Image (cartoon, helix red, strand yellow):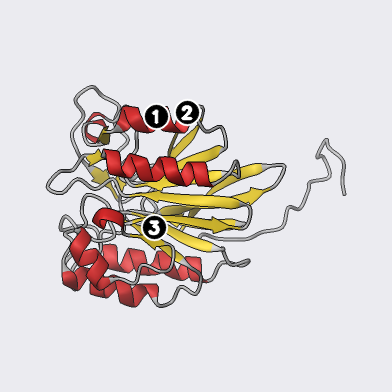
Amino acid sequence: MLIAHITDLHIRPLGKPAYRVSETNALTERALDVVAALRPQPDALVITGDLTDCGLAEEYGLLANLLERIEVPVLLLPGNHDRRETLTAGLTLGPHALLDDGFVQFSADLGDVRLIGLDTLLPGQSAGALCDKRLGFLEKALAGANGKPVVIFMHHPPFDCGIIHMDRIRLLEGADGFREIVARYPNVERILCGHHHRPITTRFAGTIAQIAPSVTHQVTLDLAPEGPATFHMEPPAYYLHSYRPGTGLVSHMAYVERYPGPYPFVLDADYPGAHA
């Protein structure tokens, strides 16, 4: 089972780059073209929030057109740059979406794995939240997995990463409850997030938590105690998560850009290993 995972698209109205610099629409289009061309095709594409930059109807309309090139199921989550009402009106959420209490979430069984998507949006705030209703949804979805491997997707990471201005706007409300629930389920293979625009990995509640890089711009890697909030136009990237029984979930970070190659490995005569 193969999952393509992209995040933080920040779609803008036509002709308007994000933050006056990042041509997010073109960058997102290139990323979706790469996903559409993957062989073998993934079993699903998961997008973990900040689908748009301002949650405008025009932005969701543009994204809807871009998603038409994707032929596999697309699972969507909101981020702090999104608006739930406009999102649900402007995008097709698919059969796995669960809009209980208005939250945009999902629970999908793909092969041997259950995918759970949590809505961490807190309207009017940059930080994220999981209220009792959303934590209840998580508990129910985990219990219903009956021990099969589970991958949890969400926008806001539940842990500090050391980039101070991002740590201030991670998942705050409900983070302790989330940790307690996850710790009770050893079948949680991975927690996969967006929001921070960097590839970051840590241990969390007995499992592995990862943040995916953005397919647009990346947050500056600055671990100074009071580093400024800035971003760089580092190469856009995404994750491919492969699950195989007996191995578990293996994650590959892949770049959207194309680079020279591929080249064959031609071993020099002086190579000290075995020559095939």
- Residue at 40 percent across and 27 percent down: it is 180
Give the numbered dot on residue 47.
3
Left or right: 266 as drawn, with respect to 54:
right
Determine crowd level at label 3: few under 14, some 14-19, many 20+ residues with C-alpha closer than 10 A: many
Residue marked by disc 2: 183
Residue marked by disc 1: 179
Determine crowd level at label 2: few under 14, some 14-19, many 20+ residues with C-alpha closer than 10 A: some
Looking at the image, tell me whether mark 2 or mark 3 is earlier in sequence order: 3
Secondary structure at badge 3 equals: strand
* Quarter of the picture holding the N terminus: bottom right
Left or right: 81 as drawn, with respect to 37:
left
Q: Give residue 168's position: percent from left, percent from top.
A: 21, 31
Tell us which disc is closer to us: 2 or 3. Answer: 2
- Which amino acid does the dot numbered 2 rest on? Ala
- Which amino acid does the dot numbered 1 rest on? Arg
Query: In the image, is residue 276 above or below residue 168?
Result: below
- Residue at 43 percent across and 44 percent down: it is 140
Q: Label 2 vs label 3: CA separation?
A: 25 Å
Q: Are marks 1 and 2 in contact (CB under 8 Å)?
A: yes
How many discs appear?
3
- Which amino acid does the dot numbered 3 rest on? Ile
Q: Label 1 vs label 2: CA separation?
A: 6 Å
Looking at the image, tell me whether mark 1 or mark 3 is earlier in sequence order: 3
- Quick one: 132 or 223, which is closer to the camera? 132
Determine crowd level at label 1: few under 14, some 14-19, many 20+ residues with C-alpha closer than 10 A: some
